[in-house]
């Protein structure tokens, strides 16, 4: 049994498809696509859903684990590839695929002897107050490649608290899907769970699980030599090929360097009023008619500028630190709508994120008015390589048909000056997680993998707060940077 801060895992269940034919209908290996191959295979996505038990429902009835197990079996009929195990194809020099179909997903049953509201009382609920910051509510995870490839692609931990409240800790390997896919998966699980109350459940809108351009993975032999060369001659704007020696040894000038101080994750609450004030500052006072910036543009620009200033200040206070790396800013965009339904049909499940990035010159970033930085952030997500179908497809074909995929490198320069922000507040996280009731809190926890200096997520604030449009920032930074931001009155001047 696994025990973490009084959370005890009492049972582990292997869960397979309700119908054996569901996974047997798939070709093995089940090939993933060119976007999937860009994800490090050991990176998972993790989300915690917390539910308070209604007073009129008995403990045994609320979020019943037997009913959940049955719902997941039905779910896997629609997502049968999630019953397999990840494998890295050596022949295709690094492309991921799924084998051992039918092995199963995993559900863990756990208990906590304390009340759920002892950790997240009504008012300002925050995941950081849950056991181990929410990590005790997830299945244990080993980040070694061998263990990941031998473990389940999907795990769900059902934790019952003394009050009858429940948390669901959902972990899915990122290599098979993105944030939109995770919440689609949970939404489908919840629909099937609710459907069990009235008979045999079925999804009203089944998913599309075949990854885009997966037919090209390992498919260079299907092209004539001149066709293949034409694909490989394309020069993508966001990628390059490392020298062959780098691909083999992993040696690279951009190799990861651990930060000099411990990385601390914090949840920072921005009210809708505060966001409106930041957006006003991020709007060009001389903008021509028809131009605009979004709340996302404004908040990311605000974070980008203040985090960079804090890093500069940190080096003024400690001259032993290395010089900052280029202040690159990155944010993924969803290609589902940009590619259209013929490429990614409605309810497309696989990875569809394209990382957009740019860099504001350091002197401009440190001193420019916020609207100048916001304009750069706004334009970053609207370049041809992320809006033009021809550009997107050319890049994906180039990725899919590389003879040695280990050589593929992003042009984004991660380092001590960079920032990465994902926009999860656009997902209807609370509606998607409605089983017996809506969750009172949905959040991603800070894990050993997501505690990466400069990595942040924008999350919707809990619905019960009643502040429509409020955002919770989950951001990981070196500990001294938080002290500097806390003392900078400008960072939260509108709070």
Image (tube, rainbow, N blue to C red):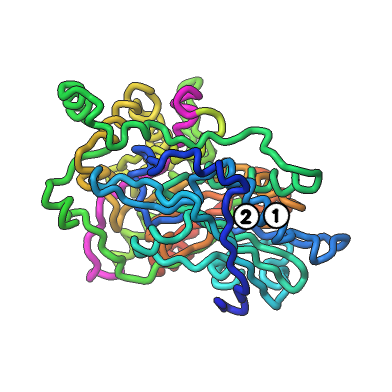
Residue 139, image x, y percentages: 53, 66
Residue 52, image x, y percentages: 75, 61
| Closest to the observer, 113 or 320 | 113
Q: Which residue is mark 2?
A: 442
| Closest to the observer, 207 or 137 | 207
- Classify residue 483 by image quadrant: bottom left
Q: Which residue is mark 1?
A: 439
Dot 2 lies on which element? strand
Does 414 sit left or right of 123 as displayed?
left
Residue 340, image x, y percentages: 48, 24
In percent of the image, x 78 and y 44: which residue is there? 199
Dot 1 lies on which element? loop
Q: How many marks?
A: 2
| Closest to the observer, 48 or 129 | 48
Determine if the magenta segment contains residue 88. no
In percent of the image, x 56 and y 57: which residue is there? 170
In percent of the image, x 47 and y 29: which residue is there? 344
Name the quadrant of the C terminus: bottom right
Above or below, comparing residue 153 to residue 266 in the picture: above
For the record, the magenta segment spans 317-344
Mark 2 to mark 1 CA distance (whole Å): 7 Å
Determine if the magenta segment contains residue 318. yes
CB within 8 Å, label 2 to label 1: yes
Residue 426, image x, y percentages: 57, 41
Q: Is residue 281 visible?
A: no
| Closest to the observer, 122 or 448 | 448
């Amino acid at each position: 049994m696994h025990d973490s801060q009084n959370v005890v895992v009492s049972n582990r269940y292997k869960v397979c498809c309700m119908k054996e034919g569901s996974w047997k209908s798939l070709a093995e290996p089940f090939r993933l696509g060119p976007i999937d191959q860009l994800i490090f295979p050991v990176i998972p996505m993790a989300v915690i859903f917390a539910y308070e038990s209604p007073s009129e429902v008995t403990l045994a009835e609320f979020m019943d684990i037997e009913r959940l197990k049955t719902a997941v079996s039905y779910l896997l009929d629609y997502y049968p590839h999630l019953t397999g195990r990840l494998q890295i194809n050596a022949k295709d020099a690094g492309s991921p695929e799924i084998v051992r179909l039918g092995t199963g997903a995993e559900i863990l049953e756990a208990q906590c002897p304390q009340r759920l509201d002892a950790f997240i009382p009504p008012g300002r609920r925050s995941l950081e107050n849950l056991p181990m910051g929410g990590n005790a509510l997830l299945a244990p995870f080993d980040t070694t490649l061998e263990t990941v490839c031998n473990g389940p692609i999907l795990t769900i931990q059902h934790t019952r608290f003394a009050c009858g409240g429940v948390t669901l800790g959902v972990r899915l390997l990122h290599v098979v899907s993105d944030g939109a896919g995770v919440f689609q998966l949970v939404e489908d699980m919840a629909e099937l769970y609710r459907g069990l109350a009235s008979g045999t459940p079925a999804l009203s809108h089944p998913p599309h699980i075949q990854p885009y351009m997966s037919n090209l993975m390992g498919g260079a032999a299907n092209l004539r030599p001149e066709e293949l060369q034409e694909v490989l001659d394309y020069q993508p704007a966001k990628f390059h090929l490392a020298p062959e020696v780098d691909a083999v040894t992993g040696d690279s000038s951009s190799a990861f360097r651990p930060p000099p101080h411990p990385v601390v994750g914090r949840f920072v609450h921005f009210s809708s009023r505060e966001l409106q004030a930041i957006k006003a500052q991020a709007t060009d006072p001389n903008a021509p008619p028809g131009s605009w910036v979004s709340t996302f543009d404004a908040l990311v620009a605000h974070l980008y500028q203040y985090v960079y200033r804090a890093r500069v200040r940190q080096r003024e206070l400690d001259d032993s630190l290395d010089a900052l790396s280029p202040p690159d800013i990155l944010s993924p965009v969803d290609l589902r709508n940009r590619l259209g339904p013929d490429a990614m049909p409605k309810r497309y499940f696989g990875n569809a994120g394209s990382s957009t990035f740019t860099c504001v010159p350091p002197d401009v970033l440190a001193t420019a008015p916020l609207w100048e930085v916001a304009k750069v952030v706004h334009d970053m997500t609207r370049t041809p390589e992320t809006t033009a179908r021809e550009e997107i497809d050319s890049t994906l074909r180039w990725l899919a048909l590389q003879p040695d995929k280990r050589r593929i490198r992003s042009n984004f320069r991660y380092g001590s000056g960079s920032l990465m922000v994902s926009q999860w507040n656009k997902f209807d996280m609370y509606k998607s997680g409605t089983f017996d009731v809506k969750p009172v809190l949905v959040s991603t926890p800070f894990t050993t993998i997501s505690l990466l200096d400069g990595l942040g997520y924008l999350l919707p604030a809990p619905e019960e707060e009643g502040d429509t449009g409020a955002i919770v920032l989950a951001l990981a930074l070196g500990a001294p940077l938080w002290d500097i931001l806390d003392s900078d009155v400008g960072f939260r001047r509108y709070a």
